[in-house]
Image (cartoon, rainbow, N blue to C red):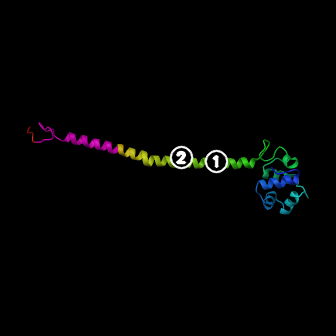
């Protein structure tokens, strides 16, 4: 863990943990990059509205930014909504992928297992029906045994 003894240290450490540039922070807060630099060097301090925006942006409490301690990223007192949202979106994406894979697997199962099985059953019924029709149409030859149609024994 980085030493974050001063307000300025905490601001910079939180920005770096979020992998944000001073320009990105400045745009999010609506100030100049120079102002962010002055905050991080302890030359100036943000107004209350900027402080709230920074806490939200960094996923920490205002209390943490001002005093340190509870509210730091990764602690039980963290209000890291951005991390929760990121995790939720990640899980939603994984779930979508799984559902799409399941749908594709089901489509392939129907196409390659169920459809051929149904076609085989249909062909078997058709063949049986044809055999039964032919059997009913053929006259039974008296005395034909062992496949000898002449009737001679």
Q: Under tag 2, what secondary structure?
A: helix
- Residue 115 point in image, percent of width and height: 41, 46
- Residue at image position (50%, 47%) is 105
Q: Quadrant of residue 125?
A: top left
Q: Which residue is mark 2?
A: 102
- Residue 21 point in image, percent of width and height: 78, 60
- Residue 138 point in image, percent of width and height: 18, 41
- Residue at image position (9%, 42%) is 150
Answer with left or right where residue 103 lies relative to residue 81: left
First in sequence, mark 1 or 2: give its number: 1
Q: Under tag 1, what secondary structure?
A: helix
- Residue 35 point in image, percent of width and height: 86, 61
Q: Which mark is residue 92?
A: 1
- Give the residues in magenta: 122-149
Q: Quadrant of residue 22?
A: bottom right
Instruction: Measure the alpha-carbon separation of dots 1 and 2.
Output: 15 Å
């Amino acid at each position: 863990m980085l030493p974050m003894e001063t307000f300025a240290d905490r601001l910079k450490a939180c920005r770096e943990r979020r992998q944000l540039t001073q320009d990105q922070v400045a745009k999010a807060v609506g100030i100049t990059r120079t102002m962010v630099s002055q905050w991080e060097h302890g030359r100036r301090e943000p107004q209350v509205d900027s402080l709230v925006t920074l806490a939200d942006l960094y996923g920490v409490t205002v209390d943490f930014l001002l005093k340190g301690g509870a509210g730091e990223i990764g602690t039980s007192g963290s209000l890291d909504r951005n991390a929760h949202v990121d995790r939720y979106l990640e899980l939603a994406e994984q779930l979508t992928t799984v559902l799409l894979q399941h749908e594709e697997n089901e489509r392939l199962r129907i196409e390659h297992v169920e459809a051929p099985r149904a076609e085989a059953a249909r062909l078997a019924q058709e063949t049986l029906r044809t055999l039964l029709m032919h059997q009913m149409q053929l006259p039974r030859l008296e005395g034909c045994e062992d496949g000898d149609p002449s009737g001679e024994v």
